[in-house]
Amino acid sequence: MTQTPEVLRELRATIDRLDAILLYTLAERFAATKHVGQLKAEHNLPPADPAREAQQIERLRKLAVDADLDPEFAEKFLTFIIDEVVKNHKSYQSDSPSNALIGE
């Protein structure tokens, strides 16, 4: 029982490292989706792509099963991210110079 505090400390340190990895990975993902959103805005493409989103959700659900993670959780997590990405893409559309010309 005397090892419990040390084991707990080590597990928490692992969790802290993994949280940092998750955040930096999300930042990298959002940097890539920013470029996608800007390209969509430049080419007047819709900010959302429901077919692509459905494919991604299905792919992540399968990966979740392989990783022994609840696929429902994986879907909720990805849906949350996709919603944020689409919101960002919409803002790029409204900021796009080509859209300013369309409104005139």
Image: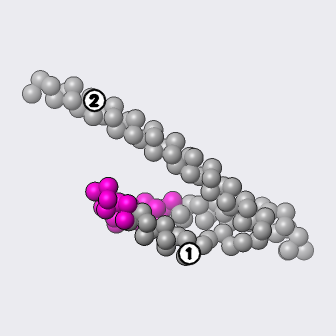
At label 1, counting other C-alpha atoms closer than 10 Å, the crowd grade (few under 14, some 14-19, many 20 or more) is few
Compute the Cα span from label 2 to label 1. 42 Å
At label 2, counting other C-alpha atoms closer than 10 Å, the crowd grade (few under 14, some 14-19, many 20 or more) is few
Residue 8: % across, % down: 23, 32
Color encoding of the figure: one colour
Report the magenta residues as a range. 62-81
Residue type, mark 1 in image = Pro
- Measuring 75% from the left and 65% from the top, which residue is drawn there? 41
Q: Is residue 7 visible?
A: yes
- Measuring 42% from the left and 63% from the top, which residue is drawn there? 60
Residue 56: % across, % down: 49, 66
Residue 70: % across, % down: 30, 61
- Measuring 78% from the left and 64% from the top, which residue is drawn there? 42
Q: Is residue 94 visible?
A: no
When the figure is inspected, residue 7 is found, relative to residue 95, above or below; the finding is above
Frontmost residue, 20 versus 39: 39
Residue 87 lies left or right of residue 9; in this view the side is: right
Q: Label 1, on which residue?
A: 50
Residue 69 lies left or right of residue 53; in this view the side is: left
Disc 1 secondary structure class: helix
Frontmost residue, 50 versus 55: 55
Q: Label 2, on which residue?
A: 10
Residue type, mark 2 in image = Glu
Disc 2 secondary structure class: helix
Residue 14's disc is: none
Would residue 67 be counted in the magenta stretch?
Answer: yes
By secondary structure, the bulk of the magenta-drawn segment is best described as: helix
Instruction: Check whether the beta carbons of the residues at disc 2 and disc 1 lie within 8 A of each other.
Output: no
- Measuring 62% from the left and 53% from the top, which residue is drawn there? 32
